[in-house]
Image (cartoon, grey):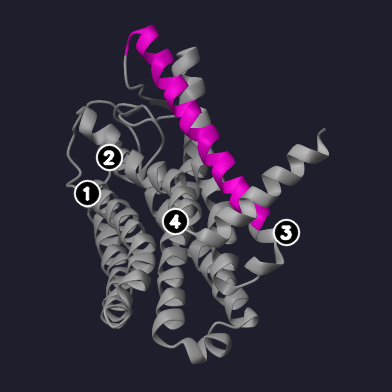
Amino acid sequence: MANSTTVTEFLLMNFAERWQLRLLHSMLFLLIYLVTLLGNLLIVTVTTIDPKLNMPMYFFLRNLSVLDMCYVTVTVPNACVNSLTGNSAISVAGCAAQVFLVIYFAYVELVFLTIMARDRYVAICQPLHYPVVMNYHCCVQMTLASLLSGLVYAGVHTGQTFQLTFCQSNVIHQFFCDVPSLLRLSCSDTSSNFLLILSSAIVVIGGCLIFITMSYIHIFSTVLKFPIREQGKVFSTCVPHILVVSVFLSSILSVYLKPSVNSETIQDMILPVFYTIVPPFLNPIIYSLRNTQVKEAMKKVILRNFYSGK
């Protein structure tokens, strides 16, 4: 073993070496972060105070928005601070916490998107059974099951990762701590870690993908029987949602199923953006600008605050 010194902290990477480019990167990330928070907070507000939006679809949309605000907060603020200060050190405990939270929120995000696909399937394909199948207690139970199972899922992956010995370079070629980057730094045997990632991808991601795909196949086959105007309304909401799910899953699979070899390309840093930042940023746009009821509720909230401020 060339270097037997145990790693006590890690160094995260920036997208650029020059300070001017780091400042530009920080401002861009900060802008995306603030827009994401504002969009999701607005959805949480309108779906909470408007009684017309007291439906299962908006119950899950509110939960997804809260989740997205937490999800994007795990990585973006820290990346902005690192770029501005040039101090990218993170302790082993802090790195473990970041790994756990990223995996946890990504897992729950995927499960929520799957549940929302089921919600749309029942609403469109089985409208008469919708109040029974998607009742309030069922929605709460599915939400709690997602949150609790996420703790187990993230705990297993985080524990398996930090059982390894890190005695090589402590430079993580990523703007946050993630499992694939850490596996490249380990001097231990990582075959069991890769097997865990592969098996969980097949079971969790594969299962959710199949469920979402089947749901939309049934939805589209039913919608094709609707009048043209009604088809347009459904497609305008479903197609962007499918695109976000596709980008989310394809980027995760590209990063986590890539062989654990040393790689320092800018592509390795950009791909995680598509599953940590893009979905929280796009979800409010898809579920607000494409939804007439949400847009009307937002106008009421904005106008009410405008006139109350006068």
Contact between marks 2 and 4 (CB within 8 A): the answer is no
Identify the residue at image location x=45%, y=21%: 26
Residue 103 vertical placement versus 220 (above, below)? above
Q: Earlier in the sequence, mark 3 or mark 4?
A: 3
Determine contact: label 4, label 1, CB under 8 Å: no
The residue singled out by tag 4 in the image is 290
- Position of residue 176 relative to residue 211, above or below, is above
Q: Residue at x 19, y 47 (%)?
A: 258
Q: Is residue 244 at least partly visible in the picture?
A: yes
**Mark pair 4, 1: CA separation:** 29 Å
Q: CA distance from mark 3 to mark 1?
A: 40 Å
Residue at mark 2? 271
Q: Residue 260: x, y in percent? A: 20, 44
Q: Who is closer to the viewer here, 238 or 190?
A: 238
Q: Residues within 10 Å of mark 2 (few under 14, many from 20)?
A: some
| Mark 3 residue element | helix
- The label on residue 254 is 1
First reached walking from the N terminus: tag 4 or tag 1: 1
The earlier-in-sequence mark between 3 and 1 is: 3
**Quarter where residue 23 is shown:** top left
Helix, strand or loop under label 4? loop
Q: Label 1 is placed on what type of residue? A: Ser
Which residue, given by chain and number where applicable, does mark 3 sit on? 49
Of the numbered discs 2 and 4, the one sitting upstream in the chain is 2
What is the quadrant of the N terminus in the image? top left
